[in-house]
Amino acid sequence: MGDISCSNGISSGNGVNGKSHSSLNGYRKSCWYEEEIEENLRWCFALNSILHTGASQYQDIALLDTKPFGKALVIDGKLQSAEVDEFIYHESLVHPAFLHHSSPKTVFIMGGGEGSTAREILRHKTVEKVVMCDIDEEVVEFCKAYLVVNREAFCDPRLEVIINDARAELENWKGPRLNQGGIFITQAGPAGIFSHTEVFSCIFNTLRQVFKYVVPYSAHIPSYADTWGWVMASDSPFMLSADELDTRIKQRITGENRYLDGKTFSSASTLSKAVRKSLDSETHVYTEGTARFIYGHGSVHQQNQAKLIRNGLMEGAPAKSTK
């Protein structure tokens, strides 16, 4: 859940939900964004201002100017990405799979409405066609308008944006969903020493039921206040050394990575003993009926939190109810 509280020692009762936040202007120095990461644990940071808020038929959207992390995109009360460190997340999501592939040409992005995933993919010189499928057109248009760093990607003729449910789009896809030698990659939630059992381990286990070769890896994302995980999977082995990855980076990527190189990926894919043990012993497999979600997903938790706020049992002013 995400809250915005603003006070000079006295809690303000005014929510910031796209209707009114004029009372925040007088207390800029004590305006904070707060998100509940898990029960009994919250993460908060100071704000310079609230740049924009809105809502679509699917979710609430906010763009915050934060003191430690720059502009931050918040959807349904959950921080999605922050200007200062989103490059860690998106370089980690995209480049390992693209570098291990012999010559990636066609790409399907499930979700990715903010455009950062497409931006990193389009840096690869071999890529000819990228299809980004996101269900929420208002989020896509919001990000086009406000996330300047991704405007060039949205204008790239190689990118096609489809507004639809990604699963429905794939089910009706005429071409092969994954070519021979293709690679599937997904973000896989928190992957910290205590948080990795939430979804990271079972996403890994689900994919190893489908693919011959599955590689989990992780990186610390400061604005998430945790280590984050990704899982890369294919029926072709991942064989490149750190030096070979560096060679491909120089040959195939336009511009310079800020975070990921060969040694960084080698380190990222070397998980701790505790996490490896959990992944090896995980038995849960995702299905429609047995899906797991990160903390805070679903309306019941958030509705209960909203009731507590309205009843004066929690400090701070709510920005909005979450998912």
Image (cartoon, rainbow, N blue to C red):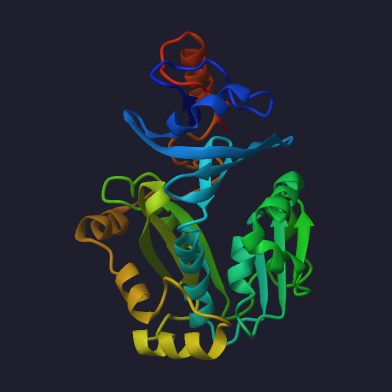
User: Which quarter of the image is occupied by the C terminus?
Assistant: top right
Above or below residue 296? Residue 134 is: below
Q: Position of residue 102 (x, y in %)?
A: 55, 87
In the rendered picture of this protein, how many numbered marks are placed on residues? 0
Please say if 132 is above or below 291: below
Q: Residue furthest left?
A: 273
Looking at the picture, tell me which residue is in the foreground, 176 or 55: 55
The answer to which of 11 and 286 lies nearer the viewer is: 11
User: Can residue 172 be seen by looking at this rendering?
Assistant: no
From this viewpoint, is residue 136 visible?
Answer: yes
- Residue beneath the point at 56% across and 87% down: 252
Q: Position of residue 123 (x, y in %)?
A: 61, 77
Residue 110 percent across, percent down from the top left: 64, 58
Find residue 10 and report its image quarter: top left
Instruction: Identify which residue, 223 or 1, lies in the foreground.
Output: 223
Is residue 43 positioned above or below 192 on the image? above
> Residue drawn 53% across and 82% down?
101
> Residue 117 occupies which quadrant of the picture?
bottom right
Q: Is residue 66 left or right of residue 132?
A: left
Instruction: Judge whether 71 appears above or below 104 on screen.
Output: above
Q: Residue furthest top?
A: 311
Q: Is residue 217 left or right of residue 162?
A: left
Most extreme residue toward the front is: 26
In the rendered image, residue 311, in percent from the top left (x then y), is placed at 48, 8
